[in-house]
Amino acid sequence: MTTEIYIKSPTSFIENHYLDLLPDWSSMPESVIIILLKSQLSLRDDNILIEQEKQRLRQHFISLAQNIQWHCQTQDSLSEIIDPKDGYAFNKTQGKVNFDVIEVVHQLLGFPYYKTPEGCKVLDHPLWQIAVYPSLLLFNIAPNKVLNLLSSQPFGKQLIIDK
């Protein structure tokens, strides 16, 4: 599966609202891992085939994110998978506010998005157009430390380093 992984610092919204987003965390996240998965279908419409494709991509993301969590586990690290389906923490206490995954990707990578007639946001990838499934993973360790931990792993070749 075609995958892109970006390691970034949090948006100002995440910095200012992390207690509402991640109530179990006592400190602000330092790293946002953006994982983009290329879809086999355009994700603009809403039908049974697209919902099945989104579920397939979500399962792939969760598996990859759990693998990344395991490789980045240190004594003092916290991490959280953000469920792309609803924008809430996957394994921890649900926050008062959910993550707008597409807005985070837009702010950190500059990829445009637009709203469908139904009001859903659709990310527009420079190469994949709207056949992209965005997702997030957060860490309380610095981006350069996450990069060092991930670079030597099998998925390290999918890392895109852009300053």
Image (cartoon, rainbow, N blue to C red):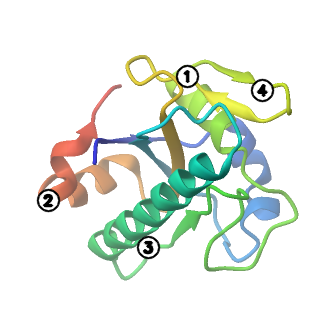
Q: Are marks 3 and 4 in contact (CB under 8 Å)?
A: no
Q: Residue 37's mark?
A: none
Q: Residues within 10 Å of mark 4 (few under 14, many from 20)?
A: few
Quadrant containing the C terminus is top left
Residue under pointer 1: 124
Residue under pointer 4: 116
Q: Residue furthest front?
A: 48
Q: Residue 154's mark?
A: 2
Identify which amino acid the numbered label 2 is placed on. Pro
Q: Are marks 2 and 1 in contact (CB under 8 Å)?
A: no
Residue under the point 57% across and 49% down: 49
17 vs 132, left or right, is right
Q: Could you say where residue 1 lies in the image, as x and y percent from the top left?
A: 28, 48
**First along the sequence among labels 4 and 2:** 4
Q: Residues within 10 Å of mark 3 (few under 14, many from 20)?
A: few
Q: Residues within 10 Å of mark 1 (few under 14, many from 20)?
A: some
Report the Cα–Cα distance between label 3 and label 4: 38 Å
Q: Nearer the viewer, residue 67 or 163?
A: 67
Report the Cα–Cα distance between label 2 and label 1: 27 Å
**First along the sequence among labels 1 and 3:** 3
**First along the sequence among labels 2 and 3:** 3
Numbered disc 2: secondary structure: helix
- Position above or below: 30 against 113: below
